[in-house]
Amino acid sequence: MEAGHGKGAPDGIGAVIKRAAAGAMLHGADIVNAVSMYDTLTKKGIAPHLFLITDDQFEKQEKTAPNDLQAVNGNIKIHQIFTREPGRFKFRDVSCFCSFPVDCDCFTPKHHMFPINEQRAIGDPSDTVASEDSGEA
Ligand SMILES: [Zn+2]
């Protein structure tokens, strides 16, 4: 396998984050969970572009996802996913950015299509399930 293939950008970013957290702890930071790691790395400017996704945000997203989604076979091996239209994507077990931002067909990506409601795919608001904050009390 050529250099640069196989390990994706997320692997490299994960390693950098782990090293940064370990370094902050060596300098006295108290990192005990995701929130304290996020706070430490962002407030000290070590990793200013991190996003913290809360359990509430995951739960909210689960409620808006269609109930009939099917798992992609072999998803634990997937390293790269790319899509150009709702409900359809290509994936492969290695990453390649040789023609980025144009998708390449290196390593024979597989195709997957979710059986989604076409109205939902184009964003018909009448088909949306509680996806917006509406000032709930
Ligand atoms: Zn490529």
Image: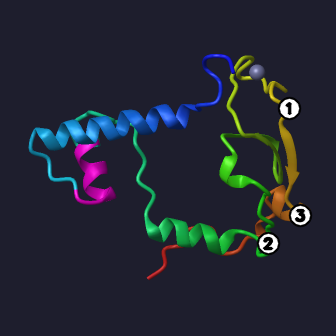
Q: Position of residue 135 (x, y in %)?
A: 48, 74
Image coords of residue 101 (percent x, y): 71, 23
Identified by mark 2, the residue type is Ser
Across and down, in percent, residue 28 comes to: 9, 44
Q: Is residue 19 magenta?
A: no
| Disc 1, SS | loop
Tell me the crowding category of disc 3: few under 14, some 14 to 19, or many 20 or more residues within 10 angstroms, Cα based: few
Q: Is residue 98 above or below residue 43?
A: above
User: Do the numbered discs 3 and 1 sit on residues whose CB atoms are within 8 Å?
Assistant: no
- What residue is shown at x 86% (from left), y 64% (from top)? 116
Identified at 44% across, 82% down, the residue is: 137
Q: Quadrant of residue 26?
A: top left
Identify residue type, mark 3. Answer: Pro
- Disc with the residue nearer the chain's start (3 vs 1): 1
Task: Give the answer, above or below, for where 23 lies relative to 72.
Answer: above
Which sits in the foreground, 81 or 55? Answer: 81
Name the quarter showing ligand 1: top right
Crowd rating for badge 1 (residues with CA inside 10 Å; few <14, some 14–19, many 20+): few
Q: Residue 115: which disc? A: 3
Q: Between tags 3 and 2, which lies in front? A: 3
What are the residue bounds of the magenta stretch?
32-41
Residue at disc 2, CB closer than 8 Å to ligand 1:
no
Residue 96 lies, in percent from the top left, at 70, 25
Marked residue nearer the N-terminal end (2 or 1): 1
Dot 3 falls on a residue whose secondary structure is: loop
Looking at the image, residue 117 sits to the left or right of residue 100; the answer is right
Image quarter hosting the N terminus: top right
